[in-house]
Structures are given as C-alpha cells and as structure tokens.
Amino acid sequence: MLVGTRFERWLPDGIIHWHGLTWLWLPTPEGPRWCPADATLDATLCARRGYRLVAFEESQPDAGRLPETTLAGAPHFDVLAEVAPFAAQPEAITALLLSRVDLWSTLAEAARRDGVTM
C-alpha cells in the first residue's frame, strides 16, 4: 500500500491498479510456459526500504514475483487481482494507459524532481 507516502495524492486508495509485472516465455522441466518476472523494485530501493529482492530462478519459474514479506517479515503487499499473461497487450489496456498520459507525466516529473525511483 502506498497510503502515507508521497505517492498518496496519485493513489488515494493506496492501490496500484496496473503494476508492471512482466511475463517471459521460458523452457521449464514441464515444457515451455509463461513465467512471471517482476523487475519493478531496484536493489537500492529494496535496501533503503527493507524489501526483499525478487529472486528469479529457472528451477523455480514462479519465483519471479515480488516477495510477500519485507526483510523484517512484515507483509509487503497484497495481490488483489491478476491479469493473465498476453502475447500482446490487449487494446483496452493500451487505451486506458494512454487516456491517463497526463498522470504518468506528472509522476515522471515528480520522480525527476525528487531523484527517486519509487
């Protein structure tokens, strides 16, 4: 949740509705399949905030998600819903993201001004 952070004005309910989870088509012992790979939190941010880094391993193809707990063992986040992987992004999602370009520009400017990643 981003409640109580400098991002609250953009996410008043604290929910990131479209998180940037990436899916990779990879070979696995059971055959090729889509595997999650979340690269949204960099090592500097994780160290500063006490988060765990994502540990992607080919032997555990579902391990590429954000860890459920922080280094202190506190809950890190809750996944409220998940959209399945797509070979190409659905047009409805593209339209939604493009309809809020003004918001993304404001977020990018705040990040540049404050020198932050998140």
Image (cartoon, rainbow, N blue to C red):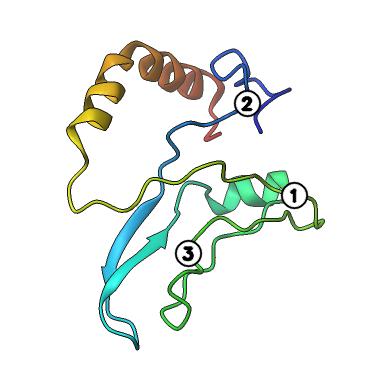
Q: CA distance from mark 3 to mark 1?
A: 17 Å
Quadrant of the image occupied by residue 106? top left
Residue hosting label 1: 75
**Residue 23: image x %, image y %?**
33, 58
Sequence-wise first label, 2 or 1 = 2
- Which mark, by number, is residue 14? 2
Sequence-wise first label, 3 or 1 = 3
Q: CA distance from mark 2 to mark 1?
A: 15 Å
Q: Give the residue type that dot 1 points to.
A: Pro
Sequence-wise first label, 2 or 3 = 2
**Residue 47: image x %, image y %?**
68, 52
Q: CA distance from mark 2 to mark 3?
A: 23 Å
3 with respect to 53 (left or right): right
Given residues 52 and 42, the one toward you in this image is 52
Does residue 1 lie above or below 36 as drawn? above
Given residues 13 and 109, the one toward you in this image is 13
- Which mark, by number, is residue 64? 3
Quadrant of the image occupied by residue 79? top right
User: Mark 2 falls on what kind of element?
Assistant: loop
